[in-house]
């Protein structure tokens, strides 16, 4: 989705803005632009297409002199991805430039009003109303002009404003769309994402909704929505720029797959003390936990599938019914949720619009929300009742890998902790689970090592027009994520089915050579899944099984096998997904796909 950067200082702004925009490319976008305050006023350069095109157009920024500016990568919502619709937008008098993330819901009415007053619109965007409002409300005082203009806006917006009358000043405004300020020495920044800031400063201020900031090279002042100055803490970003770079890997996705042992270690290590799972951020006593008579999990995409996979561990260990619901469905479903519902909200980015809306809906009905989030300071992290960070570090590839496995790790810890506190986790089972949790980083490494040959195997599957992923119980949950990985980066149609459902319709689609990925890591149901393997093979399917290392039964039945090390059934999804991530990666590579930035997708889906 859209990305924003802003810089004010004494250095040349344009190269820094372009560099910042490059770091935001992973979010997905279709046009880019910058506006820089120069000697002759604000100069805007924008292009449809990649940031590289903007670099070429501007000689890497050298052609746009000036030391204060704003930049944007746009993911089109209102109007096609054209040069004209790209941000920044300029007011008719050329004195204001604006970049915007989010959606102005009342833009049509504002556009009509502004047009009637004689303002000329050049673009089809909702954003353009903002620059004309700024011009209309111009009072000579930038801060109060911005306040009056944003008071007219309905919807979500992170804004960066540049005004020719105050050449070294930027204004940053946040309402329901992320915006982070970077605190430098003699220079200051803002960005929609901390990845654009870390190469310049690690000192960040996270704006909250309704707040805005005035930035000059000398300092940053933050205000609430009434214009009253407020104090905000400066947070130290814990990871450095290398964490957001490829580090020798061909793609971020591959790097992030390989980072999973370390990421899962970071998620679990601080939460294991003296043989106990300790969740400091969610330290409820048994009496409080007993008040929850159900758990609802809400999320989108892979985060939802993490919820589907963790449902089994949560129910088995806590004996509380667990219902995963897609956030985009939950928000409009008049849900049966009340103060006895524990809502678990899962999100890598913490900014997914549907997930935020579902959380708000459920909290309004009395539910308490526990967020499981990766991005520190994100909207979901800040608005939940409790937040467990997954500590996966920056995830740049659009297809989540370490984001998903760290979510599972945290969910498993949660299941153990709650189960233990409620006295529902068997004393004999606990040490066995703890043993597997402690070994998770090693087991994940082992799963990666066991699958180095997947590049070669992918050559057998990459020409498929359709793939089916099947499994039962925990394996079905793994299959859901496996199929999503495959379709989002390789663009091959992939479907996941509960293996037992095949003969209720889907088996009609199996024909000679149809690839079927069968997840068989649930020992209790293995024979059942094998019977489904036999059925599809009888109809010509080529079966690739995901199974425990040394499983001879599967070797005898499947055409190809990929292996993971043995682990307790409840935890298998965290390992079973590894070969499927690698398979999707190598199939996409074989097909020459844009693996880190698949078409039509964005890393952080901040619009409905
Ligand atoms: C995963 O590979 C996808 N890119 C997508 O399904 C993602 O998981 C979903 O959009 C949710 O994102 P979030 O975790 O940031 O909320």
Image (cartoon, rainbow, N blue to C red):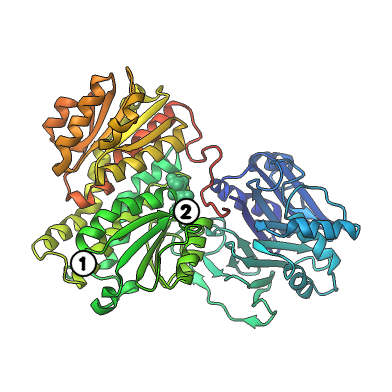
Image disc number at residue 125: none
Residue drawn at point x = 42 percent, y = 59 percent: 374
Where is residue 104? Give x, y as percent. 69, 58
Q: Residues within 10 Å of mark 1 (few under 14, many from 20)?
A: many
The residue lying furthest to the right in this view is 118
Cβ of mark 2 under 8 Å from ligand 1: the answer is: no
Which of the 4 image quadrants contains residue 528?
Answer: top left
Residue drawn at point x = 24 percent, y = 56 percent: 313
- Note whether residue 92 is visible: no
Residue 65 as seen in the image, left or right of residue 246: right
Q: Tag 1, which secondary structure?
A: helix
Taking depth in this image into account, of 448 and 600 the one nearest to the observer is: 600
Residue 187 as seen in the image, left or right of residue 604: right
Residue at image mark 1: 419
Cβ of mark 1 under 8 Å from ligand 1: the answer is: no
CA–CA distance in space, label 1 to label 2? 29 Å
Residue at image mark 2: 329
Q: Are marks 1 and 2 in contact (CB under 8 Å)?
A: no
Looking at the image, is 203 positioned above or below residue 62? below
Where is residue 339? Give x, y as percent. 38, 74
Q: Tag 2, which secondary structure?
A: helix
Residue drawn at point x = 20 percent, y = 41 percent: 521
Taking depth in this image into account, of 357 and 227 the one nearest to the observer is: 357
Which of the 4 image quadrants contains residue 90?
Answer: bottom right
Looking at the image, is 318 positioned above or below residue 580? below
Residue drawn at point x = 83 percent, y = 56 percent: 112
Q: Residues within 10 Å of mark 2 (few under 14, many from 20)?
A: some
Residue 371 as seen in the image, left or right of residue 283: right
Q: Nearer the viewer, mark 1 or mark 2?
A: 2
Where is residue 587? Give x, y as percent. 39, 29
Where is residue 215? Give x, y as percent. 68, 70
């Amino acid at each position: 989705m859209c990305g924003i950067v802003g810089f004010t200082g004494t250095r040349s702004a344009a190269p820094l803005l372009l560099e910042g925009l490059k770091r935001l490319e992973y979010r997905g976008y279709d046009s880019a632009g910058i506006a820089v305050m120069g000697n002759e006023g604000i100069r805007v350069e924008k292009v449809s297409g990649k940031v590289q095109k903007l670099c070429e157009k501007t000689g890497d920024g050298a052609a746009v002199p000036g030391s204060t500016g704003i930049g944007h990568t746009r993911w089109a919502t209102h109007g096609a991805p054209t040069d004209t619709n790209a941000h920044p937008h300029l007011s008719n008098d050329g004195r204001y430039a604006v970049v915007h993330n989010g959606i102005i819901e009342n833009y049509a009415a504002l556009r009509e009003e502004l047009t009637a007053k004689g303002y000329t619109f050049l673009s089809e965007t909702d954003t353009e109303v903002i620059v004309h409002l700024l011009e209309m409300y111009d009072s000579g005082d930038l801060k109060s002009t911005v306040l009056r203009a944003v008071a007219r806006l309905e919807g979500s917006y992170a804004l960066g404003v540049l005004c020719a009358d105050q050449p070294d000043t930027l204004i940053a405004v946040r309402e329901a769309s992320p915006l982070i300020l970077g605190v430098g020495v003699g220079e200051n920044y803002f960005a929609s994402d901390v990845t654009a800031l870390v190469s310049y400063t690690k000192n960040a201020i996270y704006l909250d909704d309704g707040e805005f900031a005035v930035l000059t090279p000398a300092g940053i002042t933050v205000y609430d929505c009434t214009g009253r100055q407020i104090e905000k803490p400066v947070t130290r970003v814990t990871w450095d720029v290398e964490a957001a770079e490829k580090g020798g890997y061909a793609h971020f996705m591959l790097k992030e797959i390989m980072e999973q042992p370390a990421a899962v270690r970071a998620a679990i290590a601080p939460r294991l003390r003296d043989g106990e799972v300790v969740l400091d951020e969610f330290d409820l006593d048994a009496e409080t936990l007993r008040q929850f008579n159900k758990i609802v999990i809400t999320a989108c995409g892979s985060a939802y599938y993490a919820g589907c996979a963790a449902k089994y561990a949560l129910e088995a260990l806590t004996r509380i019914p667990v219902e995963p619901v897609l956030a985009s469905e939950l928000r409009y479903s008049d849900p049966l949720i009340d103060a006895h519902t524990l809502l678990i909200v899962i999100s890598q980015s913490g900014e997914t619009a549907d997930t935020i809306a579902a959380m708000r809906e459920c909290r309004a009905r009395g539910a308490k929300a526990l967020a499981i989030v990766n991005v520190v300071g994100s909207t979901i992290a800040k608005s939940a009742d409790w937040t467990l960070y997954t500590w996966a570090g920056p995830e740049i590839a659009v297809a989540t890998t370490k984001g998903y496995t760290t979510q599972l790790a945290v969910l498993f810890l949660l299941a153990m902790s709650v189960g233990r506190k409620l006295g529902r986790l068997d004393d004999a089972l606990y040490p066995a689970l703890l043993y597997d949790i402690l070994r998770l980083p090693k087991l994940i490494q082992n799963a990666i090592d066991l699958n180095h040959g997947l590049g070669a195997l992918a050559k057998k599957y990459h020409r498929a027009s359709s793939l089916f992923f099947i499994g039962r119980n925990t394996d079905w949950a793994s299959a859901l994520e496996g199929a999503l990985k495959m379709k989002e980066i390789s663009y091959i149609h992939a479907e996941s089915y509960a293996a037992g459902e095949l003969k209720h319709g889907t088996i009609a689609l199996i024909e000679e050579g149809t690839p079927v990925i069968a997840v068989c890591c649930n020992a209790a149901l293995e024979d059942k899944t094998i019977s489904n393997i036999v059925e599809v093979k009888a109809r010509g399917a080529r079966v690739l099984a995901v199974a425990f290392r040394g499983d001879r039964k599967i070797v005898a039945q499947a055409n190809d096998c990929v292996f993971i090390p043995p682990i307790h059934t409840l935890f298998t999804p965290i390992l079973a997904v590894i070969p499927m991530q690698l398979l999707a990666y190598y199939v996409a590579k074989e097909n020459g796909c844009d693996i880190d930035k698949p078409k039509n997708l964005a890393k952080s889906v901040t619009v409905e």
